[in-house]
Each structure stands twice: as structure tokens, then as C-alpha cells.
Image (cartoon, rainbow, N blue to C red):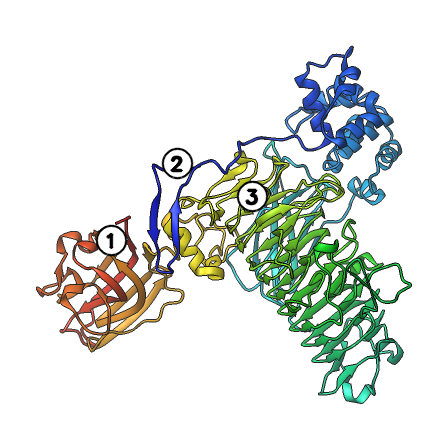
Amino acid sequence: MNSRISAGPIWLIFTSVFLIVSCTSNSHKHEATTYAVQPGEKLNTYLLANNAQPNNINALLLKYDGSKKAKRHIKLYRNEIAELFTKKVLDITPSTNSDEIKSRLQSITTEESTALFSLYPIDTAKWMKLISIHSELAENEVYESAIAAGLDPSIVFKASAAGFEDSVTPLINSIGIVIYGQDETSTATVRFRADDEMRWQKGLNLSWEPVYGSFAGSIVYLNADTTYHIEVQITDQNGEQQEHVFQTKTKPNSPPIDPEKIYYLSDIYSGGQLDLEALNISGSADGYAKIIGDGQVIEASSDDLAAVNIGAQSYVMLENLTIKGGQRYGIFAKKAHHIWIKGCNVSEFGREAVDIRDGLAYASPTTNSPINYDSGIYLERSGIAVIEECEVHSPNLGANSWQVGHPKGANALQVWAYHDSDAYRGEFIVRNNRFYGAPNHRFNDVIEGRKNFERRGGFVRNSAIYNNYLAYANDDLIEIDGGQQNVLVYGNEMEQGYAGISIAPNMLGPSYVFHNHIHNLGDETGKEWTAIKAGGLIARPAGKTYIFENVIDVGRNGIAASKVNGDTTFWIGSQNNIILTDNTGYSVGYCIFDTEKYYKNTSTNDICFNKEVMEARYEFNLGQLSEHPEADNLAYIESIMQAGRAAMDRQMVMPIPNFSKHSIDESFEPLDLKQAHAFDPYYWKLRTEDISITPFAKQYDYGETTIVDNESVAIQGNSWVKIPIDFDVVKSTELTATLLIEGEGAPEIIGLGFETDNKVTSERVIRFFGTQNWGINALKYFSQPSSQITFPLGDFVKGEINYLVFVLDYDGVSKKNNDIKVTFSNVTLRSGSD
């Protein structure tokens, strides 16, 4: 990690008139500390530090003055904790050998087992497996002790269930994977390929999931309606391997439609509520029933619960409907599945305030509950749904701000994806929508999940929220709280909320938050908390969230916690993010604000910058922090700020398999540092993906230009061609390139030009080979037929460059005499700090 100590202030003025004072230091980075998190870890650390012996353990426990949770466990289980410590059960780690584990657990009692499950809420599956294998307790006794500790019975039985089925779940552009019966010390690598491709691509390793003892994860950026082959190789700590092979097909971009069940709105609607249950409209797996808007507006009265009632009807598609009104909801379904809502415009829904008490709105003077949970779209206890290309806006009632308590009011979309049938749970896709309030008329949350503190709450599992615009909330812009296994949030733009994305709590992971642009936060009073809100790892255990390559530009915090049942612990893997903050103060202006400093949290290669103190600002376990190599380069930071959302498309120093946009197959290698500088004003490298090649001046006579790969261009004939470039050459600018010449001819000039317009200038063309004495002579820098060139461009050319010109001047060429080919590769411009 860089020391970040400077000799004194350095002033830099950038083209954006952005004035920077560099006073970089370590003053805003706290010392690296590894904290015990689970109550069992805390108590074991305390007893070891105080040299606990059998004759003084109880006394030491009574003197414990640490966390409230640990104190509560001492009150409930003091004698059991003393026995577990004496038997060294609390010292069992992944490296403890099997014989030693058996000797420590063999005589464990049901009461001690209950205490152990309670002391280690994250490690449910681990202790379930170890106690079941190594103790003398019967299976029913193990289950009873786990339930007595407050564990969910479904976890108790599923975690140890023989033959609990692995799964792959396809969405339209992603696939979720879960493989059960695993150990934390193993690793699970992934590769995949489309059915019509021979090349395998590397996926991100699956994540350890400690609740059920599984490996889980997602493959993203897939094509719709495509068959994929997937191979997962699990390697344990002894090097033993097992392979899991899957084949599945992603969902299509549109559902199958029953041609006998296509309804135009004007044919079935005559005013008031559109009630699909009353009309008995539903489809089947072979074909959805489809209702198409044809100009008529659905306008419900305040007596209708919803403007459109889907009810429990399934296999239904709504397309291009304009919907207004509804006492509570614009569109409502309950216990339905296979719902597809496309291109609908929903507004003017929900209750209106009749009474205001302490700043909260009530529907009548006699009700005790403030207005809350009214929704543009609410799919209650429903699963397998697509909501796309819709606009939801203008609810009848805006939410209150935090000034009078937790915001209450309407939301654009409310989700509870826990259908009664396990086969229909989760699988929500929310894409390409615009959900927005107004500056003084805001949603509570824009996308809200119900049953936030339950594993069956929110999106539950295998869902994706992507490419949406979400704005104007007095609380969160997106909530995915609750069950989050293989829930993806990506490609969204979010602004004007108190918080951006809430993942508090993640009760079953992993979830993934990537490639989002979160900026311009603030509720209606201008207050904000954080771009990504986490918490509740211990109180509501226990899932991990991966946070990748987001661009976050906010006033207060990038990633921070909110209390969940008093618990601010969270578990994240953060990588390749850009996190910019404006302000400073207590709990303000941190890229990551983790007061618990959970030892499994990691920050890798993030760009972190606070604009007020002009350096990174963390409250984090610094032992788990690996900074971006350009973290101290103020010019690079400025270029990132100038780029805004586009900065997430830069080449990554450490690409993430399958997630990074420039990481496409299993053979990728980490890019060198300078390849990360897509927006560095002192660095440029030839990338052929998006270039436009055109003839230069009137020098193009005959030939062919070929893009060889993403870093190489080849030319033949008598050919001068140009590509646009935006770069300022200074004294220290150095040109590097690889030049390959093939053929036996005698061309006049082979080289590179650095031009400001479409006119030939001899003072700006570097000649590396050729018979004509023209341009800047650089023959000594090239060894035929191929060599790496390093040339001091700044000694010969100065100022702005608008075009890079590839030069093959060969007057003797013809269709029959075209024997010279020149390939330019790895063309790079670098400047020092002039």
C-alpha cells in the first residue's frame, strides 16, 4: 500500500478548472485491526487473553464487559460456554485435523450444542456438519438443539439433508448456480460456453455460503434463449477434486403467446378496474394470455384496490397499458406466477392524506397506521416475473422525510417473491424501466422489498434488476433486503435518494452489485447516508455481497452500515469500484465505513477519493485493503471524475472473470498498470474495438487496411490512413510500438504521423523505415524486419494531436506488385509529470 506522505502542498490546475491541493497522508486511515465478530469468537478471545483455567472461567465470564450480544449469551449459557472453552471446542478451525475435532466434540451435550449454535450464528452449516459427524448426539438431538438456539427449522433440516439437490437457474441474461454439501476450505472454479461455441470462458469462482453449507454464484452477461454448458470444479484443502457439469438454456426475450388468448384492451375494458380474475384471463406454460393497450386509458376509482387486478392468474402478459388510479396499487397480483409486464405507464395510484399527525399522512382521522406500501406495481407472494420498459411515476401521495421518522408512503415497485410453491419463488427480472418521483413529491423507496428481515423476503433468490433509471426517494432507491441468493443489481442509474442500494440484511448470499452509477444523492431535505447500505450479518445471518466496478459519486459515504436489530456488521467483497465522496466529519465522507472491521471484508483495487481532504478515506480493516496502483495519482483521479459513468468501461488492472467488460475468456491475463488508464490524460494506447479508420489527406492511393486484433493494425499498398486521437504531447512524451514489415519491396516511407488536421506535415511524421529522406528520421530506433520501438516523441513533436496516421508510402505498388505488409502493434503514448 502506498505511504501517502508528501513533502508539502502541490497545486495542479486541470482543464475543468478543478483546483486540487495535495496534502496526502495516512491521517484518514485507521490502523488495521482484525475484530472477532461472532459472540463465540469474542468470548474465546477474551478467555484466552485472560489465561482462563477451569477454576476461574465462570468468574471471568461474569466480569466480561464487552459487547451486549456476548453478555446476553453469557447470561443464557455461562456454564455451557465454560465447558466448550475447556474442551477447546471454541478453538476448532478449518486446519484442525479430524481426530482432534472428534476428541473435542465427542462428549458434547445437547445444551452445549445449543450454546454453540447460538454463539456462531454465521457458521450454521459448519457446526451442524461437525456435530453430526463427530459427536455422540443422535440426529434428532442435534436438530432439537439447533432449533432451541433459534435457528430456522428449514435450515436445520436442509443443511444436513442427504441428496439436497444442486441447482442451476437461468434468467434471460444470467444463470444462478448452487451446489450443496460443501466445505469452506474448498474452492469452486467455473467455466462455461454457449452451445455453438468451442471456446470456454472463465466465470467468477463460486462463493462460500455458510447457512446451508453450499457454493453459490452467478454467470452474467449471457445471451437470451441460448443453451450453455457449465463446468464447476471443486477442490478441497487436500487437493481432491470433484466436477459438476450442467447444461441449461437462458430464457427468451419475450414469452410464448397463445394466439387464441390475445386481447386488445378496448375489447375487454369499459371503465373502472380491469379485473383479470373476473374475466378469467390466464394462460399456460405453452402460451401466455396477452392484453395489449390500444389507446384507451385504464382509470380506476379510489374504491378499487388496484387499477389492474391480476390476482392469482398466471401466465399473463400486459403490454403498453396506460394505467391511472387504484386505491392502493396500479397493478396488483397475489400468489401468481409467470407475469410479464412490458411498456406500461402507471401513475396517480395510492391513497391520499386525509389527516397529518406528527408529519405522517393518514387515510382517515381514525386509523392508527400511516399510509405506507402503496405501489405502482405490487406482486405479493408471487414469482417468476418480468417487468420491463415501464414508467412508474406520480403517486397520489409523496413520502415523508427522515425529519419526522422513517419515511412512509408509496413506492414504484414492491416485491415479495416468495410464492407458496418452491418452484415459483424468486426469478424476478426488472429491466429497462424508468421509476421516478419528483423533487418535492417522492417515493418512500423506489423499489421496495417486503419482509426485509426474513430469508423469504424481498427478491428471495435468482433475480436481476438492471438497466433501470431510478430517482427521487426519501429512503432507498433499491431494496434487496432479505433473501439475496444470486440476486443481481447492475447497469442502473440512481440519483436523489437518502440511500442508493440497500442490502441490509443479506440473509442468504451471494448477491452482486456491479456496473451501477450512483450519484447526486439526497432526500427532499438534502440529507443522505450512503450509496450502498449494509448491515445485520450477525443479527440476521449470513450472506456476502460482491460490489464490483460501480461508479459512485456522492456527498457522504460509498458503502456504509445501518443497524439491523442493533447490528452494523456486514460482509462484502469490493473490487474495481470508483468511490468519490465530497464531505468529511464523523461517519461522513468514507469510501467504506465499517466500524466493525469484519475480517472477511475486502477492498481490492478500488479508486477511493474524498474531494475535501484530497485522499482516500476508509474506516476499514486495512489488512484487507489493496489499493489501486494509481490511488495517489491526482491526474488519474481527475480523469476518472471527468469521465463520470463512462469510467466503468475502462480497462481494469485486475479484471474480474465474466464481470469485467474486457474479460471474455479463461485465457485472460491481468493487464499491466498503464492499460488501466483509459481516461488518463498522460497515457494513450491503441485499442481497435471502437476506432474509425479513414484515408489521410490525398495520400491514400491503393491498398488494404486490416484490424489484426484489439491492439494491431496492418496496412498494404500505397496507403496513409488515420484514426482520431485526443492527446497532448509534452517534453516527456514517449512513443512505444511494435513494427513488423513483411515482403521484399522498397517502400519510400514506413512510419507514424501525429497530426492536428488532414494535411501532411513532415515535422510530424516519424519515419522508421524507407528509402526517401523525408520526415523525422528515426531509422536507428527500428531493426528490420520486426522490433519493439521506443522513441522520444516529445523531443520532436509538441502540442495537441487529433489524428494518428499509419504510413506506408510505396509509389511502386500495384495490384500485381503488392508485396509489402506493415503491422503496427502495441502503439502507446506515455508522458511523465512535466
* Residue depicted at 80% across the width and 30% down the height: 72
Q: Quadrant of residue 313?
A: bottom right
Mark 3 element type: loop
Q: Mark 2 highlights which residue?
A: 5
Say which label, 1 or 3, has the lower sequence index.
3
Q: Mark 3 highlights which residue?
A: 585
Q: Report whether 215 appears left or right of 626.
A: right
Q: Quadrant of residue 306?
A: bottom right
Separation of disc 3 and disc 2 at Cα?
22 Å
* Residue depicted at 9% across the width and 64% down the height: 771
Which of the pair 131/483 is nearer the observer?
A: 483
Q: Report whether 276 appears left or right of 730.
A: right
**Amino acid tagged 3:** Gly
Mark 2 element type: loop
Pinpoint residue 625: horizontal percent, then vertical percent: 51, 39
Badge 2: few (under 14), some or many (20 or more) residues near its Cα, within 10 Å?
few
Badge 1: few (under 14), some or many (20 or more) residues near its Cα, within 10 Å?
many
**Amino acid tagged 1:** Thr
Pointers 1 and 2 in contact (C-beta within 8 Å): no
